[in-house]
């Protein structure tokens, strides 16, 4: 199992002092190499859930255990993320996780290649420009290596973001509505890319989407409302 | 991509803002470094202790003026002292035991803006009477191999080697030497010039010049004396103001007609003549002498001279001078030019600007030597450079003795210049330094504001970096490194600019003083300043870095 979540809870305190439960997930598992679609609407706590999984946010209670077997010379990993300090959570994220956002979140001053290399900058491994170029070639941007984001189309920008998320050969890729800003044709292309590259690096994929056309292409679909007791909305899984 | 590449990338992304911030640091540091450097070098320039002489004797007036005029050839001479005092220092039992060497300076005239100084061959290591090298020196004034320099500290001397004759150096341990040509003859219209003169005046060995009275300003009509000197030697560079001086024999200086007249007038005044007998009085004895900045010199000093020497009478002095009164002036075009006979055919154009002609004050022997009409008792010196027999006590003793008399004053140039520097230059430099520190602090605040604004505009980027695995400390380091780098680069460029400014100042000093400054060497205080600015920049970066450190990632990753 790549991720095992138990009794994960996160509350927010509102401006008036009221406490609002946002995430309350008794149990959730993501298998090794498994591609899971997490279906949720606005208010279902999906972004907070992903941020907890990435260690960007700390849970109030509960555990998130990452377990990876040895791979590519990297020793096996068995970590309870919420038990780590913030810097170590950051380091863990940089080392083992890939993150794809709804919008590309590329750095505007950096070229496509540099943005991908940036994804390698916060690990203990040496930067691998050849791998970065390979990834950009895989996403169809071999001839756009030195373009800055502003010179790329929205679809191309998102493809660079996909390449960046895979730059560290992550064990888990977390994708938050990665196709949300794309037209259906481009959305399909990007989804296929993500899945293909995740398979290439043997990464598990947890992809949040509210689009059934996207979510049903993954191995398993999970309604966030079904696993999150704090969710206020739900979407039927088709 | 390492941290430094990341920082450079971020800086390039907002290049204009980065450069402007760097520019503000650069200007602050350049100002500070320039000030530090010029203060240091001015101190080295003016508060030097390595004079080739310990004491300067001159007229009882401003000590500073005496030193500036004698050492740096600046300002005007504060006045003259009787030539006899030069002899007194050499022979009087009160002074003689203290004095190792003494050389007179007679100053006040110029050649196309460069100072002419009348002195004795001894200054250069030659005999005052014969013009031959003193013991231990060759024809160029260089030390002979068999001898050791008298300028070497006695403690360091080789007991087996004879010591060359005592001379006065232009700096401690540094003696004048000729680069080419020979020493001037002590009684001829010849000159030995400083190393810069051939370039400045386009005059080399064999070239001739006439001396202008005083140092006329650009809007003043130069009063050019009739006599013409020939350059016979060029000195090696001394890197002092002396490189821009034309040295001529003292006797030739006194041979200038108007000098003679002034000196005679002064002698007459000292002898009790009625100075008010003339049409206009000489305002002071020194004014009647030649050295004062006095555009009207000819009108009243000469007049006073003639009238005082020949009170109330017609110009009796002409009786003996007219015989070889040479130069055809405007009133006598084409007149006889007897002077040309001994003057190697030099032309004697009418002095420009209505200068009325002086009477000749000398005759020439068949050998071409000057024979002054003026008795030695009427001679005067502007300054005497004295090297004492050693030890600070000797110099102070001499200064005390001379100052106690009523003839002259004596000063230690180092002391005077130190006093001048500490009184006038140092406070100004400190004020300027304070201003530059304030400018640097403003620049540091500029760094803070600039980077704080950039961090505010980059919160999403910082959040992205965090999402990619950058720790808070890494983000803090990135921002601090950026601030430090801006500060450091600004400081280094400022250091370079500051030295560039100092190079300009050096060129100015070189032009005005004949002596530049060391604008290349970076002093410890400058390195400390650069380090200080870098640290201030780092501290200035802490506030925005703290803001970046506290950036909530999740909040800033929401939306596009």
Image (spheres, helix red, strand yellow):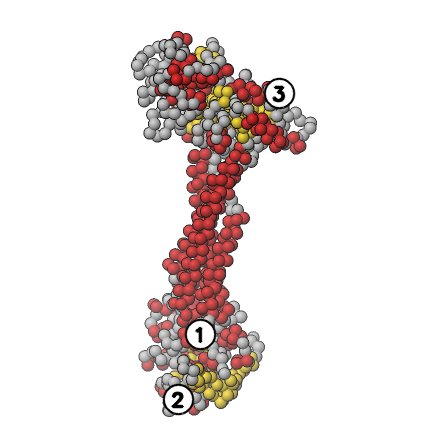
- Same chain for the residues under marks 3 and 2 in the image: no
Mark 3 vs mark 2, foreground winner is: 3
User: Which residue bears the numbered disc 1?
Assistant: B552
Residue where numbered disc 2 is placed? A232
3D distance between C-alphas at marks 1 and 2 = 24 Å
> Which residue is located at x 45 percent, y 20 percent?
B253
On the image, the x and y values in percent for residue B266 come to 45, 18
Instruction: Give SS at disc 1.
Output: loop
Which residue: 39% across, 88% down? A232
Tell which of B540 and B370 is nearer to you.
B540
Classify mark 1: residues with Cα within 10 Å, few (<14), some (14-19) or many (20+).
some
Closer to the eye: label 3 or 1: 3
- Please tell me how crowded label 3 is: few (under 14), some (14-19), or many (20+) other residues with Cα within 10 Å: few
Residue situated in front as seen by the camera: B36 or B86: B86
Q: Is residue B121 visible?
A: no
Kindly identify which chain the residue marked by label 3 belongs to.
B
Disc 3 to disc 2, C-alpha distance: 116 Å
Is the residue B37 above or below the residue B59 in the image? below
Disc number placed over residue B93 in the picture, else none: 3
Residue A163 locus on image (x, y percent)? 43, 74
The reply to whether residue B447 is in sight is: yes
């Amino acid at each position: 199992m790549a991720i095992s979540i138990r009794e994960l809870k996160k509350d927010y305190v509102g401006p008036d002092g009221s406490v609002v439960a946002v995430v309350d997930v008794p149990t959730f598992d993501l298998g090794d190499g498994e591609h899971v679609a997490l279906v949720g609407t606005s208010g279902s706590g999906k972004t907070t859930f992903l941020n907890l999984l990435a260690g960007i946010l700390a849970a109030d209670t509960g555990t998130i255990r990452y377990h990876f077997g040895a791979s590519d010379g990297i020793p096996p990993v068995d970590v309870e993320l919420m038990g780590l300090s913030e810097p170590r959570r950051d380091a863990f994220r940089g080392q083992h996780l890939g993150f794809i956002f709804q919008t590309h979140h590329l750095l505007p001053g950096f070229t496509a290649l540099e943005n991908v290399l940036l994804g390698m900058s916060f690990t203990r491994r040496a930067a691998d420009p050849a791998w970065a170029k390979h990834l950009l070639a895989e996403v169809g941007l071999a001839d756009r290596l030195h373009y800055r984001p502003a010179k790329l189309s929205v679809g191309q920008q998102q493809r660079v973001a996909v390449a960046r998320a895979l730059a560290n050969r992550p064990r888990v890729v977390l994708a938050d509505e990665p196709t949300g800003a794309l037209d259906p044709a481009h959305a399909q292309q990007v989804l296929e890319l993500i899945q293909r590259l995740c398979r290439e690096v043997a990464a598990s994929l947890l992809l949040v989407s509210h689009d059934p056309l996207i979510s049903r292409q993954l191995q398993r679909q999970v309604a966030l409302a079904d696993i999150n007791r704090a969710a206020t909305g739900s979407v039927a899984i088709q | 991509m390492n941290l430094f590449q990341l920082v450079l990338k971020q800086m390039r992304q907002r290049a204009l803002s980065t450069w402007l911030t760097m520019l503000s640091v650069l200007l602050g540091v350049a100002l500070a470094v320039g000030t530090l450097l010029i203060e240091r070098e001015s101190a080295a320039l003016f508060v030097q202790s390595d004079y080739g002489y310990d004491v300067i004797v001159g007229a009882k007036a401003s000590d500073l003026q005496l030193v500036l005029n004698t050492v740096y050839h600046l300002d005007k001479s504060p006045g003259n002292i009787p030539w006899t005092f030069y002899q007194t220092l050499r022979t009087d039992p009160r002074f003689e035991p203290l004095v190792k060497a003494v050389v007179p300076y007679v100053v006040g005239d110029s050649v196309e803006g460069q100072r002419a100084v009348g002195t004795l061959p001894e200054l250069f290591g030659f005999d005052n009477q014969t013009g031959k090298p003193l013991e231990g020196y060759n024809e160029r004034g260089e030390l002979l191999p068999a001898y050791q320099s008298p300028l070497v500290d006695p403690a360091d001397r080789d007991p087996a080697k004879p010591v060359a004759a005592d001379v006065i150096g232009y700096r401690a341990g540094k003696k004048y030497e000729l680069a080419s040509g020979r020493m001037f003859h002590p009684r001829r219209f010849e000159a030995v010039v400083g190393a810069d003169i051939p370039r400045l005046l386009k005059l080399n060995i064999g070239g001739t010049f006439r001396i202008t009275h005083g140092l006329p300003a650009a809007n003043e009509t130069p009063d050019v004396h009739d006599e013409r000197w020939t350059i016979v030697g060029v000195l090696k560079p001394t890197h002092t103001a002396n490189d821009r001086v034309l040295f001529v024999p003292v006797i030739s200086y006194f041979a200038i007609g108007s000098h003679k007249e002034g000196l005679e007038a002064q002698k007459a005044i000292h002898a009790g003549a009625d100075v008010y007998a003339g049409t206009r009085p000489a305002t002071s004895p020194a004014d009647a002498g030649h050295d004062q900045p006095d555009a009207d010199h000819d009108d009243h000093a000469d007049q006073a001279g003639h009238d005082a020497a020949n009170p109330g009478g017609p110009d009796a002095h002409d009786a003996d001078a007219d015989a070889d009164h040479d130069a055809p002036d405007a009133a006598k075009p084409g007149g006889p030019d007897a002077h040309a006979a001994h003057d190697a055919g030099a032309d004697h154009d009418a002095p420009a600007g209505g200068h009325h002609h002086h009477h000749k004050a000398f005759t020439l022997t068949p050998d071409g030597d000057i024979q002054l009409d003026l008795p030695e008792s009427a001679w005067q010196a502007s300054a005497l450079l004295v090297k004492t027999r050693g030890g600070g006590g000797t110099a102070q003793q001499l200064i005390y003795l001379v100052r106690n008399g009523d003839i002259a004053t004596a000063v230690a140039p180092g002391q005077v210049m130190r006093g001048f520097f500490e009184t006038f230059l140092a406070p100004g430099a400190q004020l300027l330094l304070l201003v530059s520190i304030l400018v640097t602090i403003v620049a540091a605040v500029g760094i803070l504001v600039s980077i704080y604004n950039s961090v505010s505009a980059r919160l999403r980027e910082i959040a992205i970096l965090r999402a990619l695995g950058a720790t808070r400390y890494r983000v803090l380091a990135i921002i601090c490194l950026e601030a430090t780098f801006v500060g450091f680069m600004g400081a280094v460029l400022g250091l370079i600019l500051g030295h560039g400014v100092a190079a300009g100042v050096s060129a100015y000093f070189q032009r005005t003083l004949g002596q530049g400054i060391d604008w290349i060497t970076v002093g410890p205080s400058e390195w400390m300043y650069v380090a200080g600015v870098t640290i201030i920049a780092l501290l200035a970066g802490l506030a925005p870095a703290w803001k970046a450190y506290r950036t909530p990632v999740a909040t800033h990753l929401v939306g596009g």
